[in-house]
Structures are given as C-alpha cells and as structure tokens.
C-alpha cells in the first residue's frame, strides 16, 4: 500500500510524527506499506515548522508545495492546484490527512476528485461553532473521507449522527498523545527559564491565536489586563503565535509580569507546560496535552470540540469574557483544581493501531 501523508501546520507535525514511525516499523516488519510525505507549506518558518521536523525526527518532506500565506480561499485554492499536480505525478492508494487545518480540507477534496481514498485522523470532533474556520474544515473533510480514526467515543458518535457507516469509523485514541508520551523524557529547558527566573509551579503559560480572542483590539487588551490582574504576581510566559503578533504590536500592551516570546519548539514548550501552575489558552491541542500532563488548563473559548478534556481531564471552558477568569483563578490558587484522568485509549499506541487497521483493510 502506498500512502501519501499530508502535513501543513504546526499541530499537524505533532500528529504525523508517530504515524510515520508506525508506517516505518510496519514496513520493517514485512508489511507492504510505504509513504510519501507532502508538506503543503501552510506554516513554513523555523519556529512553526522546521524545529518540529528536527526535534520529532520527522524525515524531510518528499515535496513542499510552498503554499504559505493568503486568505482562507487563496490558501485553499493554492493547495488544491499544487496538490492535484503532485497526486497526479505520484499516485497513492490512500491519502492520510490529520486534524482540521486548511491543508486537511484542501487535500481531501483534491484526493476524492482524483478517486483516491482518504483516511482522516482526528475525525468527528465538532465544536458546533461555524465561525471557526477549523469547524468548516472538519465538516468538509468528514463528509468526503473513506476511513475515520477518532480520538473519543463522542467523536465516533458525531460521525454516526452525520450518517457515516460505523464500519468505517475506528476509535483508536490520540496521535498527539503518542508524541507527547514518546517525547516527555526529552523535554528541554528553554533559555527563557533562567532569563525570566521561572520556578516550578510558579508561573503561567498563555497562548492565544483564535480570531474571537485576538482580532478585537479592545478585547485583547482587556483580556491581557485581566489575566495579569488575576495571576497574583506570577510570571506569565506568552509564546506568541504569528497571527497574534501583529495585533499585539498594534495594541502596544506591556506588563512587567508578562513575557512575550517567539513560538517555542515542541520540547521547550512542553517543558514549560509540564511545570506550569496553569495554562491559559484558546488552543485545542494544548488542552489535550495539559490533560495528559495533569496541568490545570483554562480555555478561553465558548465551545470545545474536545469535551473529554473538560469531562475527564484538567481543562475548564470559561468563555471569552475576561470577567469569567476570577472564580477559576480563585479555585486554582486555593488548591482546589480538579485532578483529572487520562481519556480512554490516549496511551501512546494510537498510531500503531491506525497502521494495523490500514494494513488489514488493504491486505
Ligand atoms: N506548541 C509548541 N510551541 C508553542 C505553542 C504550541 O510546540 O509555542 C505545540 C503544542 O504543544 C501543541 C501544538 O503546538 O502540540 C498546538 O498547536 P496550536 O495551538 O497552534 O493548534 P491547535 O491545537 O489549536 O489546532
């Protein structure tokens, strides 16, 4: 079986690394399986792409489509045009897409129009919030895919509700957690640790990149002020996503307690997360990692496509109103944060399960 694996943006790299390992191991064990890695170039610089390939041991992509930048439509169109050429030149039995970024959706459409089967890893998750570009990517990808690998029973149920035949849905767990478990003993102390003077469980990690939090000028400033106010003098480390950086310059917010840093490499970022008092974020993937690391997490969003991080894990969904922060910070500082458990099948073996299933389907 020849598979083409698609990766475009930061969270994708973390999800494909263990899948590539599993394909390689399966090939070594005598299965007839090989892969071609296509990087769409959606994220392209050292901080958002190269460092992940290096640290996670992902081989260099066979091709880079160099589709960075542009509006949602421009990027989708660019990826589609370039991936169509790529797939015509290098046909595959199956295209594997992960997550919910523009590349996931664009490559799925192209593959299906070329009559190539598609497997979606992290299928079926839904926030119900159609203002999120990711929700549209999820719905389009899942309406076209052939095989669905899910991170939770709830995600499988969402797909059944959408009318998908249960025989094509496989609840396997979470490939992002495969990476986390494999890399946990290799986390690296970032330079900023000593520079800022951080101490274990005595600082907060902050990440923000969703339009709902970032794009309203007044809103972002008010939110940052409230985070500083509620943090009881603790240092706040904010690795700034490229889409947030521009806005931060515009609003000119400064606080001696908040350190704005470049996006960190995976091993450095998770070193910080593992030792943080809490993480405040609007990311999806980070809520899964904090759940497994047992670190309190506050999500500044109205909805989540990953409800198990709240019902099972350490995450609380508090909405985007800065006023909602105070009671949760009280809970945190009084030592009453819920302990949380690890969701079913988030055990580090998901990618092996996926490749075993694909080997059986294509035997
Ligand atoms: N991450 C990282 N460095 C950072 C911020 C995040 O390595 O400075 C990792 C994080 O550990 C997680 C992933 O990037 O694995 C999450 O990516 P992001 O928040 O961009 O995407 P989302 O999960 O919201 O789709």
Image (cartoon, helix red, strand yellow):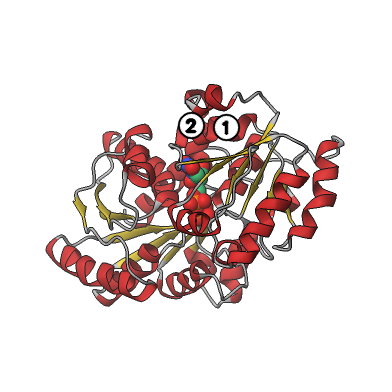
For residue 268, the mark is 2
Horizontal side of residue 361 vs 4, given as left or right? right
Q: Which residue, as the protein is rendered here, is positioned at the far left? A: 89
Percent position (x, y) of residue 204? 66, 38
Q: Are marks 1 and 2 in contact (CB under 8 Å)?
A: yes
Q: Element under label 1? A: helix
Q: Residue at point 55% right, 78% down? A: 163
Horizontal side of residue 177 vs 287, given as left or right? left
Q: Residue at point 21% right, 72% down? A: 81
* Badge 1: residue crowd in 10 Å (few <14, some 14–19, many ≥20): many
Residue at the spot of label 1: 272
Quadrant of res 236: top right
Percent position (x, y) of residue 321? 73, 63
* Badge 2: residue crowd in 10 Å (few <14, some 14–19, many ≥20): some
Q: Residue at point 38% right, 35% down? A: 56
Q: Nearer the viewer, residue 280 or 314?
A: 280
Mark 2 vs ligand 1: CB under 8 Å?
Answer: yes
């Amino acid at each position: 079986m020849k598979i083409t694996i698609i990766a475009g943006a930061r969270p994708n790299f973390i999800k494909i690394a263990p899948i590539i390992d599993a394909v390689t191991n399966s090939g070594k064990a005598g299965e007839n399986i090989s892969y071609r890695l296509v990087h769409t170039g959606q994220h392209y610089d050292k901080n958002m792409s190269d460092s992940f390939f290096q640290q996670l041991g992902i081989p260099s992509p066979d091709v880079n489509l160099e589709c960075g930048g542009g509006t949602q439509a421009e990027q989708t169109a660019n990826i589609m045009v370039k991936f169509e050429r790529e797939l015509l030149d290098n046909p595959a039995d199956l295209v594997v897409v992960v997550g919910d970024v523009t590349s996931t959706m664009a490559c799925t459409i192209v593959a299906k129009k070329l009559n190539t089967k598609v497997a979606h890893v992290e299928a079926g998750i839904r926030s119900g919030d159609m203002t999120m570009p990711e929700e549209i990517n999820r719905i389009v990808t899942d309406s076209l895919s052939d095989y669905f690998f899910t991170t939770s029973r709830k995600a499988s149920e969402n797909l059944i509700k959408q009318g998908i035949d249960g025989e094509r849905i496989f609840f396997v767990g979470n490939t992002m957690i495969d990476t986390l478990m494999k890399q946990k003993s290799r986390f690296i102390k970032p330079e900023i640790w000593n520079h800022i003077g951080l101490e274990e469980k005595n600082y907060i990690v902050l990440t923000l990149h969703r339009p709902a939090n970032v794009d309203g000028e007044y809103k972002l400033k008010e939110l940052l002020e409230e985070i500083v106010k509620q943090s009881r003098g603790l240092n706040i480390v904010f690795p700034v996503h490229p889409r947030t950086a521009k806005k931060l310059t515009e609003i000119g917010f400064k606080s001696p307690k908040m350190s704005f840093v470049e996006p960190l490499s995976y091993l450095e970022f998770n070193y910080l997360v593992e030792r943080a008092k809490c993480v405040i974020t609007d990311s999806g993937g980070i809520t899964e990692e904090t759940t497994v690391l047992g670190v309190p997490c506050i999500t500044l969003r109205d909805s989540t496509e990953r409800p198990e991080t709240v019902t099972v894990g350490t995450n609380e969904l508090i909405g985007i109103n800065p006023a909602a922060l105070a009671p949760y910070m009280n809970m945190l500082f009084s030592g009453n944060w819920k302990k949380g458990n690890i969701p079913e099948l988030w055990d580090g073996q998901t990618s092996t399960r996926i490749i075993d299933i694909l080997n059986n389907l294509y035997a």
